Image (cartoon, rainbow, N blue to C red):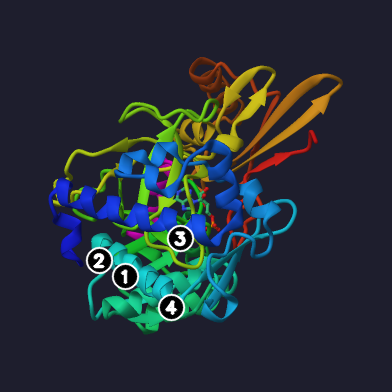
Amino acid sequence: MVYNEVEVVDRSELTELQTDRLRETVERAYENVPFYRKRMDEMGVAPADIQHVEDVRKLPMTTKEDFRDEYPDGLFAVDHEDVRRIHASSGTTGKPKIVAYTDDDLAVWREVMARSLAAAGVEPGDTFQNAYGYGLFTGGLGFHDGVEELGATVLPIGGGDTKKQIEMLQDLESDAMGCTPSYCLYLAEKAEERGIDPTEFSLSTVVIGAEPFTDAMRDEIEEALDVTAIDIYGLSELIGPGVSVECAKAQEGLHVWEDHFYPEVVDPETGEPVEEGESGELVLTSLTKQALPVLRYRTGDMTSLTRDICECGRVCARMDNVRGRSDDLLIVRGVNVYPSQIEEIILDFEEVAPHYRIDLYREGNLDELELTVELVESFDGDIDDLRDRIVSDLKSVLALTPDEVEIVQPGGIDRQETGKVKRVWDHRE
Ligand code: DLL
């Protein structure tokens, strides 16, 4: 369902809208945020230099370090009395990134989330079980508002409390659910442990995001719960969930709501834009944010963009599923490898469950990689032979020789009930 006509306007009309909005955003940032005024002055760029949306390239970039340096409110462009809500995103180290919303920002967020849910196939009247965490994390409230805006029923259960989630899924017959991909698997497993068949829930759609996952992981989820799993992307710095989403019709890339967020993809090393279709780091500029306008935010997320019109008719650019962040890259004895590449290989083995962990150590000057994978219940083969085949695939596809592949029994890898899943443990620092 197309929620807003702007999703299907001509590209030229969209570009005009983006140009107007970018000019207003740059003006607002320059006038109200000393940080941006200083950066632009240093670069010799004035708001009047922005005549077309593609002039975005003249603007300075913003990084997560800038958010940290300007902690807590140095990037705000409005007075505190106009801030209606604050969220925060905690990284692994240091202070969280604080983000702010005016009334208008909250209205935009509700709108992009309602649009995202509609594209995902959620319909007015559906019951949506919201298992994203409420609180400073943007997942819970972002989804909550969007479900209400769409005219569906929100069940604000939040993250965790899996027994209650299962009870609600059964008793309220939720049609759709929002949660992280790792939680989908956790939930299915816990249901089975209680003797409940998770494919029997009335769920037809899960809207999954907040952490990367491979196609193989998505297949596992769709099978375990007998659902369509739709990828939704977003980040606190830009708004929260609802920056882009797959449509249920094609499931071919995530539609970026370009009337609010302008996407670019750049080479993560040089910061220079790459050709359409090429992979690089996603850079986003907010086009309507009032409390916290963000110019060219370096997300760290690796993707590519296409502007081909989708079979669903939506015109906005589509980004490829984010398989990881530029700073997820593991360099193991000189071999560059993303955890998602390892995930893809191990999930190709039907003997292996979708749970794994990667441990990195340093012995003397040498990196060591230890991979732990878990067997599926039905396994009755030869463990040594399985190990050999996994090692051989890692070697031939990734040129990576793990120092150890440990194969554990079903349930042998610790599960995480809430938050973003952690699979890589780097003990080298
Ligand atoms: O994770 C917002 C969100 C909530 C998105 C619920 C989707 C669903 P942050 O906590 O600020 O915000 O984390 C943002 O999470 O830069 C990506 O690295 C990662 N991420 C978010 N969605 C996806 C996704 C929320 N669909 C960071 N695929 C982003 C891969 C994702 N990574």
Q: Crowding at label 2, few (<14), some or many (≥20) Cα neighbours within 10 Å?
A: many
Bounds of the magenta span? 214-226
At horizontal 30% and vertical 73% (from top left) the residue drawn is 175
Mark 3 and mark 2: span between their CA atoms? Answer: 31 Å
* Label 3 vs 2, first from the N-terminus: 3
* Label 4 vs 2, first from the N-terminus: 4
User: Please, is residue 267 above or below residue 413 in the view?
Assistant: above
* Label 3 vs 1, first from the N-terminus: 3
Residue 320 occupies quadrant: top left
Q: Is mark 4 within 8 Å of ligand 1?
A: no
Residue 126 occupies quadrant: bottom left
At horizontal 71% and vertical 23% (from top left) the residue drawn is 403
Q: Are marks 3 and 4 in contact (CB under 8 Å)?
A: no
Of tags 3 and 1, which is closer to the observer?
3
Which residue is tagged 3?
A: 28
Which residue is tagged 4?
A: 103
Q: Are marks 2 and 1 in contact (CB under 8 Å)?
A: no
Q: Magenta includes 276?
A: no
Mark 4 and mark 2: span between their CA atoms? Answer: 23 Å
Return the mark for residue 111.
1
* Label 2 vs 1, first from the N-terminus: 1
Towards the viewer: 399 or 236: 236
In this image, 306 relative to 421: left or right?
Answer: left
